[in-house]
Image (cartoon, helix red, strand yellow):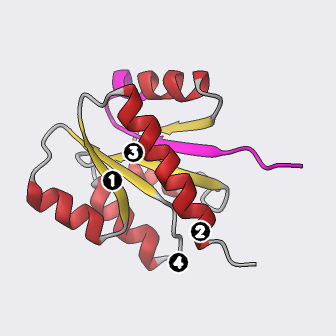
Amino acid sequence: MQQATLIACVDDDLTVLKAMEDLLDAAGFQVDGFSSAEDFLNNGQLKATSCLITDVQLGCMSGLQLQDRLAMSGFRIPTIVISAFVTEQLRIRALGLGAVCVLSKPVSKQDLLKGIQDALQRGRGDEKG
């Protein structure tokens, strides 16, 4: 039996979060949405998460801090970073922390789905049996 592909979305803008959840649900993914990095970290589904989509600017912990925290804890979840303010410095930092890609808001459906496809391929390539 194939395990469902779980995509986690973290964005404190509830309108954006709902739109991403609806888009990914319509694309056939199982989606969990979180309004903060802390909620995501405490959800108990880190090992089951196939891909993480996180905004950079969140409440207490930023999306980049979330990436760093996951890496320090040994979780290698392929991550897509989104931001309304993408700079080259942000892109370099996010990719250096292991992000699959960095997307500018508003994110197009095709860019998001391509990023997820790349993230899932990376995740399968990192699996060790």
The numbered mark, 3 or 1, whose residue comes first in the sequence reads 3
Chain part drawn in magenta: 1-17
Number of the front mark, 3 or 2: 2
Identify whether 40 is placed above or below 72.
above
Inspect this view and state whether residue 61 appears: no
Q: Quadrant of the C terminus?
A: bottom right
The numbered mark, 3 or 4, whose residue comes first in the sequence reads 3
Asked if marks 3 and 1 touch (Cβ < 8 Å), the reply is no
Q: Position of residue 95 (x, y in %)?
A: 28, 64
Identity, as a three-letter code, of the amino acid under mark 3: Ser
Q: Which residue is mark 4?
A: 74
Secondary structure under tag 1 reads strand
The numbered mark, 2 or 1, whose residue comes first in the sequence reads 1
Q: Is residue 5 left or right of residue 79?
A: right
Q: Is residue 58 left or right of residue 122?
A: left
Secondary structure under tag 4 reads loop
Identity, as a three-letter code, of the amino acid under mark 2: Gly
Return the residue nearer the eye: 68 or 95.
95
Q: Which residue is mark 1?
A: 101
Which disc number belongs to residue 36?
A: 3
Q: Residues within 10 Å of mark 1 (few under 14, many from 20)?
A: many
